[in-house]
Amino acid sequence: MNPTPNADRAYARVVNAWCMYDWANSAFATTIMAAMFPPFYRSLVKAAGFGEADATAFWGYTTSIALLSIAILAPVLGAISDHTGGKKRYAAFFASLGIISTGLLAFLGEDTYVLASILFILGNVGFAGANIFYESLLPHIAVKDDIDQISTRGYALGYVGGGILLVINVLWYMKPEWFFIPNAGLALRISFFSVAVWWALFSIPLFRSVPEPPLAQLGQTGVNVVRAGFGRLASTFRHIRQYKQLLLFLVAFWLYNDGIGTIIKMATAYGDEIGISLTDMTAALIITQFVGIPFSFGFGWLARRLGAKRSILLALGVYLLISIAGYFMTTAAHFYVLAFMVGTVQGGSQALSRSLYGAMVPKSQSAEFFGFFSTSSKFAGIAGPLLFGVVSQIAGGSRLSIVSLIVFFTVGGFLLTRVDEREGIRVAKEEDRKWSNQGIT
């Protein structure tokens, strides 16, 4: 029987509401994480008496601590969510933490880089923590063969949403008098606050329209959920060999995503260090955002023809070229070219990685496995910014730090070629059937 028009509309409403959260939280990823806050943070460090290389290194260390924090928190929360339900409730808690911390960035003093680090870490914990539960909803809302397209649509909307607010923020910064803002410094702080407002406002559709998935009952009622959460996490590790292809994909993802994440987090800090203006860098990142829109959809189309894995490998080849070219970057024009190249692959590579992983995850354990996905990548992701910062301090500059990213893409790409995604999907479906036969819904 074909779906009724009402069912189609209801499905579209849920999918669109889910995708809108990418629109909402991408403002944090663009204005705060990637574009305007890193140079601002460096200015706080330099105002406190430190040098250029130290300012870049401190930003690298801050991002590493943020990743470590969410890595420690994520796995048990994912397991508890699957045991007790409440994916949306946990997503709301972490989103609120991120929104409040981001809003407080607007009130930082001139040299308060330590407080800036703390607020950024809390904001990042909120951003990443909410994403664990948001992404764990994807296997539950997507019908067969739609998961790649829904994931890439979310990333595309993220590019639009984050890009629109970034354009507004850049206009505030470049022409504050047009908006009756006294100076560019205040415009920058208002931009930080606007991210919090944007994130809160456009999160509403997710919490209003996306249904809470049915609870996967793992045991009797009244069980200690913290103990159950750790028990499920331990069970994931004990049975990890059952998901051999999933594990191999994870190792590959840890490596290449560390390189991608480091580029995202360190690009404007590196550009600021070598003398590229904030205006040029934010303009270039706006190009990244809007180039990413059609290319994110394009990667969804490409995945239908080449498969998700081959499409990701194509993206990693582009990232390898970006890492090499970054060493030779000296002008704003170079930054613009590299920003365009990043835009062609950033959304597609991450969206397809998310959907490929989701396809190999048992739906009955989605939050636990997505928690493990997020946690493990956060632990692995500590290495990139940390290495970037250490090399920057040792070398007295960050050019060699850019070169170090090559290894993440080459080794990660090689391991990805060894993944048999069809086998991984078969094992996940078999696990779900086993749970269903045991009366688990």
Image (cartoon, rainbow, N blue to C red):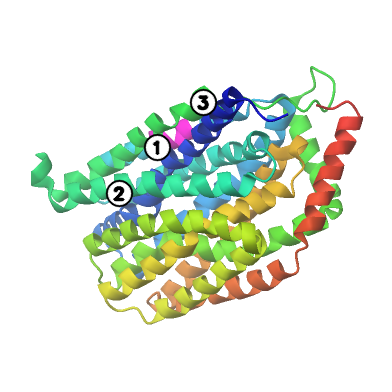
In this rendering, position of residue 263 left or right of residue 175: right
Query: Identity of the amino acid at label 1?
Result: Ser
Q: Is residue 434 visible?
A: yes
- Magenta region, mostly helix, strand or loop? helix
The residue that label 2 is drawn on is 166
Q: Which residues are magenta?
A: 95-101
The residue that label 3 is drawn on is 207
Query: Identity of the amino acid at label 2?
Result: Leu
In this view, the residue farthest toward the bottom is 328
Q: Residue 269: x percent and y percent?
A: 35, 63
| Distance between the alpha carbons at the discs numbered 1 and 2 | 19 Å
Q: Quick check: 421 above or below 416?
A: above
Q: Is residue 253 visible?
A: no
> Quick one: quadrant of the C terminus?
top right
Q: Residues within 10 Å of mark 2 (few under 14, many from 20)?
A: many
Q: Residues within 10 Å of mark 3 (few under 14, many from 20)?
A: some
Q: Residue 163: x percent and y percent?
A: 34, 49
Q: Nearer the viewer, residue 379 or 298?
A: 298
Q: Nearer the viewer, residue 357 or 174?
A: 357
| Distance between the alpha carbons at the discs numbered 2 and 3 | 24 Å
Q: Earlier in the sequence, mark 2 or mark 3?
A: 2
Q: Nearer the viewer, residue 173 or 384?
A: 173
> Quick one: quadrant of the N terminus?
top right
| Distance between the alpha carbons at the discs numbered 3 and 1 | 20 Å
Q: Residue 137 falls in which quadrant of the image?
A: top right
Q: Residue 292 falls in which quadrant of the image?
A: bottom left
In this rendering, position of residue 370 left or right of residue 18: right
Q: Quick check: 110 above or below 305?
A: above
| Label at residue 101 | 1
Residue occupying image coordinates x 79% and y 17% = 222
In this rendering, position of residue 178 left or right of residue 191: left
